[in-house]
Image (tube, rainbow, N blue to C red):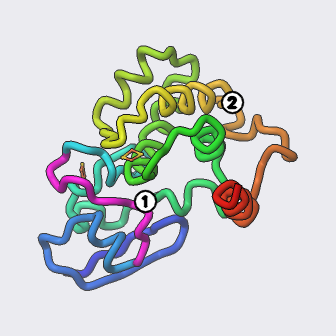
Amino acid sequence: MNVSLTINGTGYERDVEPRTLLVDFLREEVGLTGTNVGCDTTQCGACTVHLDGAAVKSCTVLAVQAEGGSVTTIEGLGNGELHAMQQTFTEKHGLQCGFCTSGMIMTAVKLVESHPDIEEDDIRHGLEGNLCRCTGYENIVRAVAEGARRFDPHSPWEMEPAEHKITLREAERRARERSRA
Ligand code: FES
Ligand code: FES
């Protein structure tokens, strides 16, 4: 079946089997491997992306169901820079192996967008559908809480002073420095 989607602002059209999952479309047809598959059974949330403005588990959606839709993946979240929620996961050490991280961040962004005054208990509740097998939940919750603090509903994700924004290249440089230390 022919499926056409907008992903991270770019249009894609592919001929796929009707049973193709959205996550497989993203990873195998388009090559966006930042969205992970942890379970394939709607348990872990590693595959979470935004579809038409909502966080969805992309192993639960057929690519054909997303026909004509607009998808944002972790690769497109910050438009080439680190999104504020990606920054706070870095700053608060909200990741260990990183396998759950893209799904956690995609869920967290929608959680905070809909509840800017979110409290810690609500964060824990809101992330229930995302599992971290490294069990790094304490720092993940801290990261989301800090992301929420920086969120301005009138100017989404623009509260960070420009000097605090870092490019992906700068983030990679800092990561290399940390690994050498
Ligand atoms: S891979 Fe989709 S919920 Fe686990
Ligand atoms: S950081 Fe390893 S699964 Fe969450």
- Say which mark, if any, is on residue 150: 2
Q: Quadrant of the C terminus?
A: bottom right
Task: Tell me the residue at 48%/16% (across/down).
Answer: 120
* 39 drawn magenta: yes
The image shows residue 155, relative to residue 122, as above or below, that is below
Q: Is residue 47 left or right of residue 110?
A: left
Foreground disc of the pair 1, 2: 2
Magenta-colored segment: predominant secondary structure: loop
Instruction: Using the rendered view, name the quadrant where residue 70 is placed.
Output: bottom left
Percent coordinates x, y for residue 76 in the rendering: 55, 61
The image shows residue 41, relative to residue 137, as above or below, that is below
Q: Is residue 71 left or right of residue 85?
A: left
Q: Quadrant of the N terminus?
A: bottom left
- Residue behind mark 1: 71
Instruction: Decide if residue 153 is in sight here.
Output: yes
The three-letter code of the residue at mark 1 reads Val
Foreground pick, 156 / 39? 39
Query: Please, what secondary structure does the residue beneath circle 1 have?
Result: strand
